[in-house]
Structures are given as structure tokens and as C-alpha cells.
Image: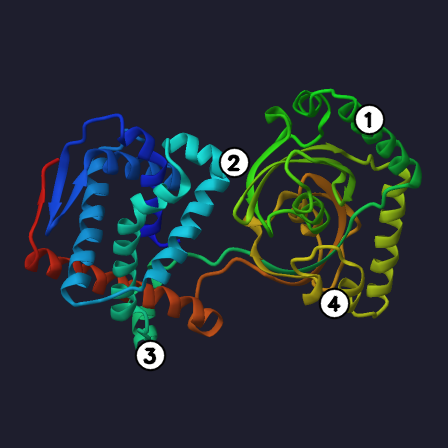
């Protein structure tokens, strides 16, 4: 995400506190101001994002100078008549607000934090969003299409070869993921538990109290099953269809999804969003279903090692929706960045070998997988022959950083700015 958008999220996060303190001006840039509360919010975000010590000497000054640079770019964009449309502003603002809603849990919670309705929150930050987009567009115009030729890459490599980082050991992987099936007995037991809860609600027992005591959704149970205001596309299909079909205050029957059985109550509607709460009764997976899943993966492993296409088997059997249509392709990974379970599974494999079935976490549940090691590249020093594109990227970023700093220095000499920290 662009650091201007990070700033907006930080301002959104700090907004409730801003209203409670008398701000002082810490910088003036052209016709704009930077307030102490804005700086504090950005410092806090920088600390969290970069995991730095809050007591680092000069940290506030460093962050303030970065904020001044952002304001200078906005001022230059306005001077150069760079424009953004209302639609662009609205789309970016909606995306940032949606991210903030996800962080706090619901639109209702966000409104509670700011003490104002959502449409007013958007009005309050629309101008800031417009400025951020102006800065992004000007930077894109100046640096976005920059390329670097082979001679420049080779010259960069000769100059900085001894300073380039080593390439870590990397592996290229594919996977087949299968979730254990629920047995008929386990489904019947969960359904019976859900039916008892549904009967209790119909007899007048408080829905929220039952959710707190019995719901197996850890994210909402403590709030009495409250899911807040949510628009279409944020629930799984079966849950969404049932929830949006309810009338105000109506309670659904049992709704089965991949997570188990749900009892849903619609609390309110607001435009295209609904405010619902639910009780989840999970279906327990048994040792028999685990054993059956492991046996299936063992069979698929044997077939692949015998010559069948691993990719075709993944397309047919894998339940990881993010990559099953890609033949289970996981891409190329630094071994130090692999999920621990995958790293252990492939640690001793040679290219072309397939791991035995391994249990992995999957959402709020679990599954089993087998992993094909397609290739392994040892750690090594970069060379033009083996790592040209890596070196090209580093060289281009180096050039952009150097040109960006030269541009900022130029703006600082042309436009008015003053630090009051």
C-alpha cells in the first residue's frame, strides 16, 4: 500500500483522540499544516510497521521530514494542475474505510469510535484522500514508466557487486490440499445440538445469551454472536443467502456451511448492508475421517510418483481454492519464509519428490496436504548469469530512490516549508 494511504489509515485510527486534544502545528508546507496529533499517529504507525524501538533518537523528526516531503509533492501536484476525479477519490476512500472497518470489527464499531455516522467520517477525510491521490499520480507520472537498460544494470553490478545481498535458498513447490470429510454421525450430533438451541430461541430464550454460552465462532461469541453491519460478498454463499433473505428480527432455521450449522438473526438493514448475529455449532471431525483423508493423499502421491501429472491431480482433488485451478502451484519461496509445516515437509526432499501427508491449519479448522518439490536453488551470491532480473530490479530501485531524493531536494528549494518541532 502507498505510504500516503498508510498515513490516512493512521489519521483514521487517531481521529477519536484528535478530537479530545488541542493540537499544535509542528510544520507548515506551502498552504498546508501538519498537526502534532497527525505526527504522533504516523510515528505510531511507523513503529508498528517497522518494529523499531519507540525510543530511537530522532524518530519523530525523521517521520516529520517524511510527512513534509509528502506535503511538498501534493503542493507540486496542485501547482502542476494534476487532477483526480471524484470517482477515484471515492473508490480509494471506500477501500481505506473498509480496511479500517475490518480492523475494528464492524461499521457500527467504527461509528462508535468516531462518534459520527459513516457518511460523515467519509466527508471528514475526503480532502485528505484527494491530496494523497494527487501525490500518487504525480509520482506515477514522474517515475512510473522508468526503465533501465542492460548496460546500466551491468555497470551497477560491477560497482556494487560486493554489497549485493546473498540470494537465500529457494524452493519451487506445488501442493494438494484435502479437508477431512464429516461423518454422518458427527453431522447428526452437531445438528441435534443446533436444534436444541433453535428450540430454546423459539421458546423465548435470549439469542445473545445463548450465543455467548454456546456459539463456537470465537470471533463473535463474546459479542453475543454480533457480526455488525456487513455488505454482500463478505459471508460464505450459504450463510449470505439465508441472512439476506430474513426480515427484521427474524430468526433462520439451521443453515449448513463449511463451518458447521448456523442459526442467524437479522437485526437491521441499512441500504445494501445487514446487521446480523449468529450461533455456530461446529461439526466435529473424527479420527476415521482423518484416516480416510490421509489414505486418499497417499494414493494421490503414489499415482504422481508413478508418472501421473501432479498438476492435473491438484486440479481434480485439491481443495485450496487459491491455487487448485493452477495445478496447486505455490510458486518459489525463500525457505526461511515458508510456513513451518511446509518447511518441515520439504526439508529433506529432492526435486521431483513428494512429501507424505501432513496436517496443516486452514482458516479456523485444518486439512492435510502433500507437497511436490519442483526445484531447489542453493543460497548463492548474485551473478548476472543466474540473477539478472533480481539485479535489474535492485538497480532500478536504486536509481529511482536517488532520483526521488534529488527531486525532493529540488522541491524543498522551490516551495515554502517550515518545521516547528
Q: Secondary structure at mark 4?
A: helix
**Which mark is drawn over residue 9?**
none
Contact between labelled residues 1 and 3, with CB atoms less than 8 Å apart: no
Residue at the (22%, 33%) spot, across then down? 57
CB atoms at circles 2 and 4 under 8 Å apart? no
Q: Point out which mark residue 149 bears.
A: 3
Between discs 1 and 2, the one toward the N terminus: 2
First along the sequence among labels 2 and 4 = 2
Quote the CA–CA distance across marks 4 and 3.
37 Å
Label located before the other in sequence (4 or 1): 1
Depth-wise, is mark 1 or mark 2 nearer the camera?
A: 1
**Relative horizontal placement of residue 34, taking residue 329 as reference (left or right):** left
- Asked if residue 406 is positioned above or below residue 217 in the image, the reply reads below
| Cα separation between marks 2 and 4 | 38 Å
The answer to whether the residue labelled 1 contacts the one labelled 2, judged by CB atoms less than 8 Å apart, is no
Name the front one of labels 3 and 1.
Answer: 1
Above or below: residue 334 compared with residue 291: below
Q: Is residue 93 above or below residue 13?
A: below
Viewer-proximal residue among 151 and 118: 118
Q: Which residue is mark 1?
A: 199
Circle 2 sits on which residue? 105
> Dot 4 corresponds to which residue?
311
Say which residue appears at 38% left-offset and 52% top-offset: 93
Amino acid at each position: 500500500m502507498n505510504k500516503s494511504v498508510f498515513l490516512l489509515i493512521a489519521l483514521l485510527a487517531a481521529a477519536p483522540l484528535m478530537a479530545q486534544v488541542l493540537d499544535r502545528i509542528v510544520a507548515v508546507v506551502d498552504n498546508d499544516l501538519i498537526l502534532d496529533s497527525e505526527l504522533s499517529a504516523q510515528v505510531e504507525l511507523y513503529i508498528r510497521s517497522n518494529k523499531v524501538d519507540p525510543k530511537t533518537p530522532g524518530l519523530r523528526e525523521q517521520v516529520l521530514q517524511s510527512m513534509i516531503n509528502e506535503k511538498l509533492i501534493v503542493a507540486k501536484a496542485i501547482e502542476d494542475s494534476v487532477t483526480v476525479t471524484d470517482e477515484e477519490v471515492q473508490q480509494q476512500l471506500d477501500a481505506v474505510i473498509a480496511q479500517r472497518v475490518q480492523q475494528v470489527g464492524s461499521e457500527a464499531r467504527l461509528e462508535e469510535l468516531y462518534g459520527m455516522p459513516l457518511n460523515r467520517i467519509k466527508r471528514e477525510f475526503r480532502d485528505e484522500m484527494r491530496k494523497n491521490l494527487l501525490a500518487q499520480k504525480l509520482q506515477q507520472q514522474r517515475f512510473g514508466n522508468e526503465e533501465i537498460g542492460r548496460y546500466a544494470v551491468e555497470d551497477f553490478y560491477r560497482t556494487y557487486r560486493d554489497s549485493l545481498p546473498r540470494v537465500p535458498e529457494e524452493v519451487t513447490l506445488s501442493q494438494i490440499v484435502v479437508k477431512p470429510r464429516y461423518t454422518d454421525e458427527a453431522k447428526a450430533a452437531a445438528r441435534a445440538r443446533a436444534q436444541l438451541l433453535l428450540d430454546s430461541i423459539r421458546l423465548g430464550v435470549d439469542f445473545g445469551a445463548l450465543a455467548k454460552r454456546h456459539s463456537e465462532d470465537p470471533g463473535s461469541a463474546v459479542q453475543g454472536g454480533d457480526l455488525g453491519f456487513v455488505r454482500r460478498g463478505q459471508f460464505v454463499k450459504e450463510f449470505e443467502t439465508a441472512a439476506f433473505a430474513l426480515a427484521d428480527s427474524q430468526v433462520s432455521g439451521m443453515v449448513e456451511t463449511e463451518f458447521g450449522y448456523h442459526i442467524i438473526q437479522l437485526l437491521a438493514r441499512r441500504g445494501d448492508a445487514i446487521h446480523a448475529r449468529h450461533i455456530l455449532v461446529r461439526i466435529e471431525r473424527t479420527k476415521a475421517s482423518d484416516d480416510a483423508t490421509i489414505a486418499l493423499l497417499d494414493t494421490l502421491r503414489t499415482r504422481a510418483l508413478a508418472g501421473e501429472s501432479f498438476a492435473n491431480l491438484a486440479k481434480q482433488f485439491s481443495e485450496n481454492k487459491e491455487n487448485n485451478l493452477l495445478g496447486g502451484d505455490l510458486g518459489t519461496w525463500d525457505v526461511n519464509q515458508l510456513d513451518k509445516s511446509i518447511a518441515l515437509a520439504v526439508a529433506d526432499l529432492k526435486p521431483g519428490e513428494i512429501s507424505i501427508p501432513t496436517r496443516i491449519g486452514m482458516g479456523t479448522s485444518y486439512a492435510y496436504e502433500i507437497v511436490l518439490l519442483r526445484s531447489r536453488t542453493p543460497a548463492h551470491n548474485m551473478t548476472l548469469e543466474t540473477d539478472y532480473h533480481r539485479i535489474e530490479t535492485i538497480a532500478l530501485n536504486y536509481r529511482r530512490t536517488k532520483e526521488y531524493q534529488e527531486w525532493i531536494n529540488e522541491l524543498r528549494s522551490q516551495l515554502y516549508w517550515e518545521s516547528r518541532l
